[in-house]
Amino acid sequence: MKFYGKETEYLLGLSLDELKLLHKTLWKDLKARKAIGLDEEASDLLYELQMILMKEAQRLGVDPAVHSEWAEFAGLEQNCSLEDR
């Protein structure tokens, strides 16, 4: 990871694996909040990370529209729904 920053703005240079880990962590946090009744939308950061990873998945031949392919690529559980089952 590379880090550049000054005062209030920072840039991170992350590897694909680091991006996946950050996305997975934010996703798990969102699921945990939902499970205890905190109903909030995903953060802009989570959304942006997901869009970046989906583009990278497509570039690597993974179809993000196929849930099992996306979940495997992103390192998520097969059932990554926010709804409790």
Image (cartoon, grey):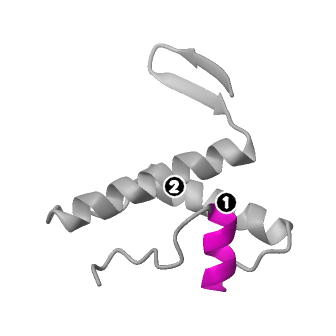
Q: Which residues are magenta?
A: 65-74
Residue 36: % across, % down:
16, 62
In this view, which residue lies farthest toward the right?
A: 60
Q: Is residue 39 visible?
A: no
Figure label count: 2
Task: Name the dominant secondary structure of the magenta segment.
Answer: helix
Q: Please, what is the three-letter code of the amino acid marked with disc 2?
A: Lys
In the drawing, does residue 31 fall left or right of residue 15? left
* Rendered position, 85 above or below 49: below
Identified at 46% across, 13% down, the residue is 7
Residue ID for mark 2: 24
Identified at 47% across, 79% down, the residue is 79
Q: Quadrant of the C terminus?
A: bottom left
Q: Please, what is the three-letter code of the amino acid marked with disc 1?
A: Leu
Camera-near label (1 vs 2) is 2
Residue ID for mark 1: 53
